[in-house]
Amino acid sequence: MVESNNLQSDQPRTSQSAQCCIVGCGPAGAMLGFLLARRGIDVLVLEKHGDFLRDFRGDTIHPSTIQILQEVGLADQLLDLPHAQAPAFAVHTALGTMTLADFSRLKIRWPYLMFLPQWDFLTFLTDQAQRFPSFHVVMHAQAQELIEEGSVICGVRYQAADGWHEVRADLTVAADGRSSQMRKLAGLVPLETSAPMDVLWFRLSRRENDLASILFNIDAGHIIGLIYRGDFWQVAYVIPKGTDPHVREAGLESLKQSLCRVVPWLEDRVDELQTWEQVKLLVVQSNRLRHWYRPGLLCIGDAAHAMSPIGGVGINLAIQDAVVAANILTKPLQANHVRERHLAAIQRRRVWPTRVIQTLQSLMQQRLTAPALRSSHAPMLPAPVRVLLRLPGVRMLPARLIALGVWPVHVRN
């Protein structure tokens, strides 16, 4: 008997099969699809949007991800794309500049963070994947139902412009983000952790004499990040959790005045903000699943663990999830014999790095971000932290954790 979760779809217009059906073509889904197709696995990726052009996407590509792409022969092509490089994670305040992580001191091949618009990264990755005949991606395909036989998930039904379609698969992978519909339909509920902030997200033009870099500014109860995107800055205006209505009630002029106080050189362009329609709210989440899988279904990336934007590590954890999943699943998928123990092995390998990074993010949020948003003065790191950061070994630890992760992940050939 085939059961349909929540929705009662019309008779599907087409029914197709795949060894692996991936829902969501973000970093985790695109990378997993590429790696499996590279090994001859028949992969179908469903993406509900028609393109990758969305503002709320992480742009940070860490050395660990560049190393993974080097292992599959794509690093040089990726680095040829227009991008910015940040050799350090520094915060500018009225008291001076605090360097929280200096990547230039790491003895690695790419001692910097690469900033590349995620739509360019996903376009690059899917273009490379489409070189393999076993890779298929369908855009404007919104997966809305799981197909279950007994207690085993054996595919999805999705809706496109021409109606309903059905996909039968040996394994379905939920890579559909922090608001995962597949996760919800499967009855998997994440454990939420508190994040003390949200982010207002908007664009301002970039002048020719502006730096081609990534800038973070903290002062007088404000945190403002400027992300280089070629001819414009993507501005991340951090606010205390849940205060978006109060900020909007105070008015757009108040927002612009605060922006100019913290980053005075933006004064000549803040009037580009004309209406609140230009300002979007990003609700910051931090959570993780107890169980990343059910028989026939695996969650990876933000669907398994939504990360805080602290350190920009979300995209890199998602990529590492995909690499570990591909390493473990290749042989079972080739044999049409994926079992729960294979899915459990993926979670065992990935849950510990996720917990470590989320714990460190929480400490940063509670010790630096939350006090900075409450303070009317320029923030300072707690005295014990400042003392520890003077020790050479400790000083390198934040940079190493951000750049390389808790432990290395490599593509198994």
Image (cartoon, helix red, strand yellow):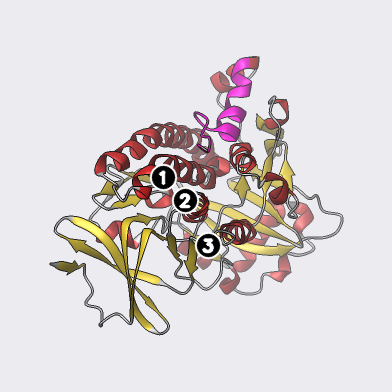
Position above or below: 109 against 147: above
**Where is mark 1, residue-wise?**
330
Whether tag 2 and tag 1 are in contact, CB under 8 A, the answer is yes
Q: How would you rate the neighbour count of disc 3 (Cα within 10 Å): few for under 14, some for 14-19, many for 20 or more?
A: few
Pointers 3 and 2 in contact (C-beta within 8 Å):
no
Q: Position of residue 155 (x, y in %)?
A: 29, 63
Q: Which residue is mark 2?
A: 36
Give the x, y percent position of residue 177.
42, 57
Q: Secondary structure at mark 3?
A: loop
In the depicted view, which residue is nearer to us: 384 or 255? 384
Q: Residue at x 63, y 58 (%)?
A: 124
| Amino acid type shown at disc 3 | Pro
**How far apart, in angstroms, are the residues tagged by discs 3 and 2?**
11 Å
Which of disc 1 and disc 3 is earlier in sequence? Answer: 3
CA distance for labels 2 and 1: 7 Å
Q: Is residue 313 a member of the stretch shown in magenta?
A: no
The residue that label 3 is drawn on is: 133
